[in-house]
Image (tube, grey):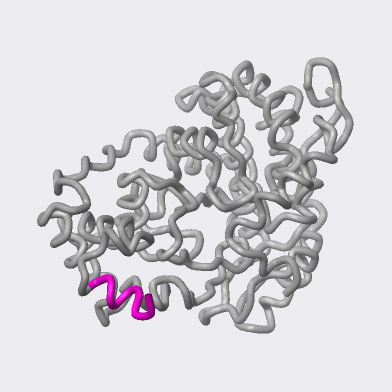
Amino acid sequence: MGNARRGRFGWGIVAVAALAVLPPGCGGCSSKNDSFPPTLTFPSRADRLVLKLPNKPAQALNNVSERDKEIAALDSVGGMTADPATTPADSREALANFLKETFGTPAAPKDIAPSLKLTGAHLAEGSKLFRRHCLQCHNMAGDGRGPAGTTLPFPRDYRQGAFKFVTSGEGMKPRRADLLHTLHDGLKGTAMPAFSLLQEGERDLLAGYVIFLSIRGQVEFESLRAIIETQPNNPAAQLKAVVAEWEKAEAAPPVPSAPDDGGSESSAHQEAVRRGFKLFTAKADNSCISCHGDFGRKPVLRYDVWGTVAKPANFTEPTFKAGNRPEDVYARIRFGIAPVGMPAHPKYSEREVWDLVRFVMSAPYPVRLPPDVRAAVYPNP
């Protein structure tokens, strides 16, 4: 479907070209101190809410230029979406007033969670950095619909509180450290660049502002859902619950350290790869091969929580989007990637998870695979 079918690495070139023509600041405007205009307010959500996804695989990747049309079309294939404009005007106005009073404006965000360093002072500085570095793709409200979003395949929309790459647990929010890792390294093979040249404190302020936008957006999303489904709606209670989810993520235990299996040529490492290969190819529910067909060369396309289409990774390619560290791969396997429907694997032992890590990280490199595994993954050398 046109540019939506570009290869794994093609979007980096598109991103550079798109961002190169965009001046810094508020969609093209700029100011000396990078602050948003003081009279500017966050817009109320106008795009459709995805309330239910189709329960069958997607047939094709998205066409970037048809985003809203394709999301609306989910209703015809077993999904459910809703237009916020169809909700009662008085309910929308009450929600808009709550959001403004609680969260403030882009130039003057309010304290919402000191326990998460989400204070007005921190957020105001994060807002300036977000305007300077992130607005072009992620837009003022964090909806992923910035000016560059017309040519890029859907920059992340924070407003449902859903994030793909977490180390905190199944279906949980990311830790601030997870967001900082993404900011520092970027997402390989995508248009999300690395911000490693920013100071560590600046990346921390940016991460905090992303959390702020996500909390605001999720409160709005869940409140609109309640109104549409004629359920009791209490935005203040929603806010308290969402903040608690972020606090829980920060308190989660760390990812365990990898076992010492020696180098890739050691017998212990080779046996771990073999065991991981057997788990990957097992004929069982939620087995890896059921979505990553032919080790990712023939993936099963899936709808994600944003109503767009996700493509499972190709493990014969050497770049993993969320990082090539063993702990990154461990977290994906153990905790899954909930927003795209990749299941968690809580029943696997620690050894089994690490065996899968060994196989997945070796799969792109035929020379690192035991001969029998290599012949299965690469039958036509």
Question: Is 231 or 306 nearer to us in this picture?
Answer: 306
Which quarter of the image is occupied by the N terminus? bottom right
In this view, the residue farthest toward the left is 267
Viewer can see residue 44: no
Residue 303 found in image quarter? bottom right
Q: Residue at x 58, y 31 (%)?
A: 195
Residue 102 image position (x, y, % from top left) = 66, 32
Quarter location, residue 173: top left
Q: Name the residue nearer the viewer: 215 or 64.
A: 64
Count numbered badges in the picture: 0
- Left or right placement of residue 283 versus residue 195 in this view: left
- Is 40 displayed left or right of 331 in the figure? right
Residue bounds of the magenta highlight: 373-381
User: Residue 200's spot in the image, x, y percent?
Assistant: 51, 21
Q: Measured from the top left, where is residue 78 in percent x and y?
A: 60, 82
Vertical comparison of 37 with 85: above or below: above
In the rendered structure, the answer to whether residue 40 lies left or right of residue 262 reads: right
Residue 67 position, x and y percent, is 75, 65
Q: Residue at x 45, y 24 (%)?
A: 115
Q: Is residue 163 visible?
A: yes
Camera-side residue of 237 and 275: 275
Name the residue furthest right: 29
In magenta segment, residue 171: no
Residue positioned 72% across, 55% down in the render: 152
Q: Residue at x 37, y 75 (%)?
A: 381
